[in-house]
Amino acid sequence: MTDIDLHSEFLRAELFLTSGQPTEAVAILAPVVAAEPTNVAVLELLGRACFESAQLVRAEQAFEALVGLAPADGWARRALARTLERQHRADEAALHHRLADALGAAS
């Protein structure tokens, strides 16, 4: 795919997510993530789509990659914490909540 195609697919996935179709958004994002595995915006959108479609392991992977790329991103820490909580892993989530709080992320 060309860069324009990747951008178009990213925007299409975002539209599907905001339209309440997160599973479709995840599927649309697959080639975008494959082409841009370290793109922060792509990882955030993928994590959100996976979280909203209850694909929690995939959401965790996306948010962990996002935290790895941007460790001072409070939103990413909060998203990872909430994903861990949904998997009944409160102890692990607590660390990320504390870091998100320290970084000034909204609750």
Image (cartoon, grey):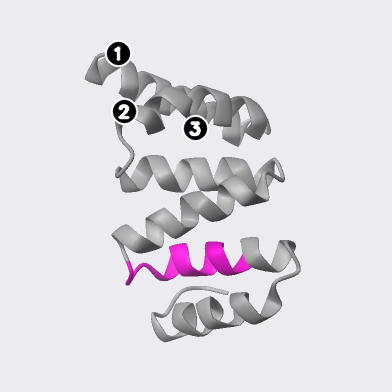
Q: Residue furthest left?
A: 3
Q: Residue furthest right?
A: 88
Name the quarter where the N terminus is drawn.
top left
Amino acid type shown at disc 1: Met
Q: CA distance from mark 2 to mark 1?
A: 8 Å
Q: Which residue is mark 1?
A: 1
Q: Residue 50 falls in which quadrant of the image?
A: top right
Categorize mark 3 by other alpha carbons within 10 Å: few (<14), some (14-19), many (20+).
Answer: many
Above or below, 42 relative to 80: above
Q: Are marks 2 and 1 in contact (CB under 8 Å)?
A: yes
Left or right, 13 with reference to 69:
right
Q: Is residue 11 magenta?
A: no
Can you give x and y, in whole percent of width and height, for residue 15 in the image? 53, 28
Q: CA distance from mark 2 to mark 3?
A: 17 Å
Amino acid type shown at disc 3: Glu
Q: Residue at x 36, y 67 (%)?
A: 73
Stretch of the chain drawn in magenta: 71-82
Name the quarter where the C terminus is drawn.
bottom right
Q: Which residue is mark 2?
A: 35
Above or below, 55 relative to 36: below
Q: Residue 93 falls in which quadrant of the image?
A: bottom right
Amino acid type shown at disc 2: Ala
Instruction: Tell me which numbered mark, 2 or 3, is placed earlier along the sequence.
Output: 3
Q: Which residue is mark 3?
A: 14
Q: CA distance from mark 3 to mark 1?
A: 18 Å
Left or right, 81 with reference to 71:
right
Which of the two discs, 3 and 1, sits closer to the camera? 1
Asked which secondary structure carries label 3, the reply is: helix
Which of the two discs, 2 and 3, sits closer to the camera? 2
Asked which secondary structure carries label 1, the reply is: loop
Can you give x and y, in whole percent of width and height, for residue 5 in the image? 32, 15
Q: Residue at x 42, y 71 (%)?
A: 74
